[in-house]
Image: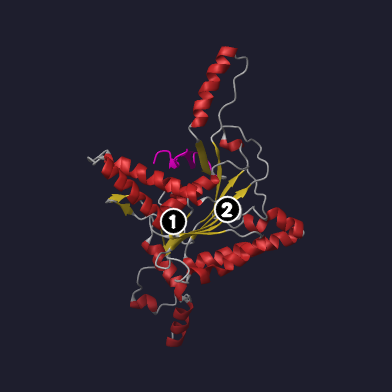
Amino acid sequence: MSAEELGRRLLGEVDMGGLDEILRSLRALRNSGPSKHFGIPELDRLLPVTEQTILPLPQTPAEIWSSSPPRPAQLTSLKPAARDPVVEFISSGPGSGKTHLLYYIASLAVLPSSYANININGKQSAIVVLDADGRFDASRLAEVMTQYIKAKLDLSSLHKPIDATPTKVTQDQNAIRGLIHSSLAHVHIFRPQSHSALLATISNLPFYLSDSTAHQSTHRPLHSIILDSASAFYWQVRAESDSPTANDRYAALTRQLALVARRFSCALLATSHSLASTSVTSTDRGTHVLRSSLPPSWAAFPTLRLAVRRVPVAPFAAALSAEELEREREQRASIVALGRFECWNVGAVGDDGFVFRIGKSGVSIEGD
């Protein structure tokens, strides 16, 4: 093999890429192993994985000058996908717990990793909320954050004595309020009123996020962009245009979101409503079929689609006496009061999901 042929062969093996791709590759190597993107084990384990390759072993001089092809790359074990997650939370209607689950995710995103020398698993990042439905409540988010911190402190107090004097309790409450207030400064909420306004808001995000005079988050990484919900302007778009054009407009939405997520290496979270489910009350997830109401250009966008609903209560048994009905009614009321909701991977086989609870004080993951 001549030197010229060798040069062409080696040049053909070189992959061209920009600095952003190199940085993403380094970040993927650093974060290899089980995903901890959200800091919620029950959710992180549902994120898709991919096989990643390593370079072949160094070749000997004889192999370099040989006309035989080089040794193939080896496959490593499964690693988290290099692409940042795009997660869609879908339900058959309102009141399913989607937004409250977003409150919980947002809480961990902006809180610090520790507080009062206690690990609280926060990501100390910033988030962007595109509140297309106009229902994202910062006050409720603060309540969820407060309950989460107190739960972590209570768990820690089981292992060491604490000072529970009135003065110390007041100081702790004030400190928690201060932490919540400073963390909320890194939650950036936008409320577009139309699909066009939504696209304009997304396209302007890089300029806004890079402007140190506009907010206090320029020193923090962007954890995620939350769209609540992707269905908000669907019927408005359908009324303004025909179905093919609606598909194009949602394609523009996915492109805009993907561009910003790629630039800031952040996750995308979105909620949506499905078409009518085949079974809303069945306790069997397999019969709870959800079909996206959005155009195909959106349906192919998420890397993970999660169904969310309130855990259904089994219907009354047939032929019960009045006394039995009253007793069962009380039992059912106590079950409903638990505020249990479930989230699972659409199309997955087996128990691929988790249960969470929503109460007056906040949100918690069962088993956490």
- Give the magenta range: 348-368
148 up-or-down from 314: above or below: below
Q: Nearer the viewer, residue 23 or 96?
A: 96
| Neighbourhood count class around disc 2 (C-alpha, 10 Å): few under 14, some 14–19, many 20 upward | many
The residue indicated by pointer 1 is: 184
What crowding class fits label 1: few (fewer than 14 Cα within 10 Å), some (14-19), or many (20 or more)? many
The amino acid pointed to by label 2 is Asp
- Mark seen at residue 228: 2
Residue drawn at 67 percent across, 49 percent down: 293
Q: Is residue 137 left or right of residue 161?
A: right
The label nearer to you, 1 versus 2, is: 1
In percent of width and height, residue 322 lies at 59, 13
Callout count: 2
| Dot 1 and dot 2 residues touching (CB under 8 Å) | no
Q: Secondary structure at mark 1?
A: helix
Amino acid type of the residue tagged 1 in the rendering = Leu
